[in-house]
Image (cartoon, rainbow, N blue to C red):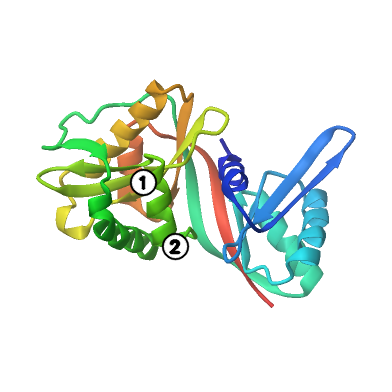
Amino acid sequence: MEHNVPATVAAQATDGVFAWVQDGRGIRGAALRTPPHPLVTSTLDAAAAHELVAAVLAADPELPGVTGPEPAARLMAQAWAARTGGSFSPRLGMTLYGLEEVVPPPNPPAGRPRLASVAERELLLAWADGFTRETTAAGAPPEVAVDRRMEEDRLFVWDDDGATSMVGTSPPVAGVVRVSMVYTPPETRGHGYASALVADVCRRALAAGSTCCILYADRANETANRVYQAVGFRPLAQAQEYSFAR
């Protein structure tokens, strides 16, 4: 579950840098980057971080930052600073949540969940842009994030006389589905649409054979954290994004 992001990125990426460190006992750590996004790291120790940073910098010297589980992300940032003489600062702190059983909302809102429609593309692009601006999370451009998910039936909306909320998912990897792009526009917030849609999307994933769902939530967003826990998500780990400055 902690390595779902690099696993799904590696499965879909067409360009970028991928590096890993291994010895006789196996792989000790891995990292990848698909520009313009920050480096994504696996769990690792300080020695593996230094080896990985050296390898990645040789191929990609202009790293803007790193994101991943703690303390691995901090160890990579420290290794980068030691090698370049630069500095780093925390940008976004996240909690990784996992869910194996859905808790249905006690008072579901009016309407129903459904797959997003191509006819709603412009609306969903605006929502994806709003999600990126509000969460400040690194991600694909709205056109890529929306179109890829719609093509693969991985973008859902709650419909209450029209779309009111949006949720996307990643392709399942090793039985894990990652929930993302959870967004309700300001004018339809406060009705429980996002809670009901997240619960339904997770129910669908588990019914299709996945063993669990995960998601990342901004630790500073109390409302989002409360919503996710209410439908059955439980904290698994802490993650952090660091920005680099030369």
- Residue drawn 67% across and 68% down? 63
User: Residue 221 at what x, y percent from top left?
Assistant: 36, 54
Q: Residue at x 34, y 27 (%)?
A: 203
Position of residue 237 measured from the top left corner of the image (x, y, whole percent): 54, 41
Residue 1 pos. (x, y %): 56, 35
Q: Nearer the viewer, residue 224 or 54?
A: 54
Left or right for 9, reference 215: right
SS at circle 2: loop
Residue 141, labelled with which disc? 2
Q: Disc 2 marks which amino acid? A: Pro
**Which structural element holds mark 1?**
helix
Query: Which one is earlier in the sequence, the residue at label 2 or at label 1?
Result: 2
Q: Is residue 184 visible?
A: no
- How far apart are labels 2 and 1 at the CA level? 14 Å
Q: Where does the image place residue 175, in percent across and percent down from the top left?
A: 53, 27
Q: Is residue 99 above or below residue 29?
A: above
Q: Which residue is identified by label 1? A: 150
Residue lying furthest bottom in this view?
246
Q: Which kind of residue does numbered mark 1 sit on?
A: Met
Q: Residues within 10 Å of mark 1 (few under 14, many from 20)?
A: some
Query: Residue placed at 45% from the left, 21% from the top?
Result: 209
Query: Of 66 and 130, which appears nearest the observer?
Result: 130
